[in-house]
Amino acid sequence: MFLIVNVGAQHFNIHNPITLPDKSQQSIITQRIGYTDITVNYHSPGVRGREVWGKMIPYGKVWRAGANENTIFTITDDVEIEGQKLAAGSYGFHLLPEEHHWTFIFSKNHTSWGSYFYQEGEDELRVTVPVEYTIDKREWLSFDFKKRERGAVSIVMTWADKKAEINLTLNVNELALDNIRKQLRSDAYWEWYSWCQAADYCVEYKINTREALEWVNKSIALQENFSNWDVKAKLLKQLSEDDAAKKAIERAIAVGSDIYLERYGRRLLIEKNYDKAVYVFGQSIKKNATYWRAHFNRGNALKALERKKEARNAFKLALKYSPEDKKSQIQNSLTSVL
C-alpha cells in the first residue's frame, strides 16, 4: 500500500510514511477479577475548548467512544454486563449517546476504523445506562474502573461534563474452581501444598466443601503437617462434623512444628480463646523449650485470664531466650503483671 500526495504541482509516491504522535493518545486499562482480565484499549480525545455532548458528539448517532481506531473491549472469560451475558473475546466498543442516557454497544467487529464502518447487524450486546453530570470537567476522555469486588467490577466513561457507569459481574467461584482443577492435573498434582492451597481457598469462601475435603485428604496422604490438618479441621467444622473437626485439630497440634503451633496460638488469641491458646503455646514450648515467642504469647494469654503469677513466669522465660531487640517489649509486658 502507498499514498499519492499532491503538494503544489509536485506528485509523490509515498511508500513509507513516518509515524507521528497522535493528538489523541492511546490508553489501555486492564483490571483482573479472579482469573479474568477486563481491558479497554482506546484513544483519548481532548475537549480543547469545544462543546462536546450534543454538538461535537451529536445525540442519536453511534460514536466510537474514543478517537482514531476502534475502541476495543476485551474479556478473557464470560461475564454479565448490566445483567446480560457477554462471551469471552474482543469487541468493538461504541457509544450511542442521548442527553440523559447512553447506550454502550459491543460489536463483533473490532478491527474497523472508528465507527465509520459500524453495522447494527454486528451487535453482540447493547446496554443502556443513565448519564450523570460531573462537578469537575474532564479534559481528556477516560475509562476508569470504579467498583472492584471479588466477582464484580464497574467501568466509568467520563468526558467533558458527563459520565456513565456500566456494571460487570462474573461467576468467580465457578471460574476459580475450574482453574484450580486444571492446575491440580499439572505438576501441582505431586505437591502436598497445592492440594492444601486448593482446599484452603474453599474454606475461605465456604464453597465446594465436599470436594475440598478430598483435596485436603490427598495433601495429607502426600505429607501430613499442621497446615493440611488445620484446613481439614476447618472443612469438617463447616460441614458441622464437630467431633471429627476436633480430632483433626488435635492431629494438627501433634504433628505441627513449634513455629506453626505458635502461629496457631496467636490465631486463638485474636479469637479470645485464651484457655486453648495457653495449651497450644505450651505444646509449642514442649517441641522447643527455648522458643521465646511461644513463652511471650503464652504470657499474654495467661495475662488475659488474669493468671498473673504464671504470666510473670512466662514473660521471664521469654526475656531469657529472646534476642536483644525484643527484650524491651517483653520487659514492659513483665512490668504490667508485677
Image (cartoon, rainbow, N blue to C red):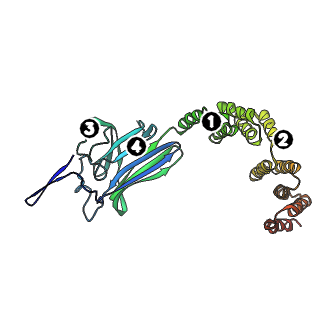
Question: How many numbered marks does the figure carry?
Answer: 4
In the picture, the disc for residue 326 is none
Mark 2 crowd level (few <14, some 14–19, many ≥20, 10 Å Cα): some
Marks 4 and 1, how far apart at CA: 30 Å
Mark 4 crowd level (few <14, some 14–19, many ≥20, 10 Å Cα): some
Q: Nearer the viewer, residue 149 or 73?
A: 73
Residue 289, x across and y down, in percent: 89, 53
The residue tagged 3 is 120
Marks 2 and 4, how far apart at CA: 51 Å
* SS category of the residue bearing label 1: helix
Camera-side mark, 3 or 1: 1
Camera-side mark, 1 or 2: 1
* SS category of the residue bearing label 2: helix
Position of residue 76 in the picture relative to residue 189 (left or right): left
The residue tagged 4 is 74
Mark 1 crowd level (few <14, some 14–19, many ≥20, 10 Å Cα): few
Mark closest to the chain's N terminus, 4 or 1: 4
The residue tagged 1 is 187
The residue tagged 2 is 254
Q: Quadrant of residue 196?
A: top right
* SS category of the residue bearing label 3: helix
Mark closest to the chain's N terminus, 2 or 4: 4
Q: Nearer the viewer, residue 139 or 325?
A: 325
* SS category of the residue bearing label 4: strand
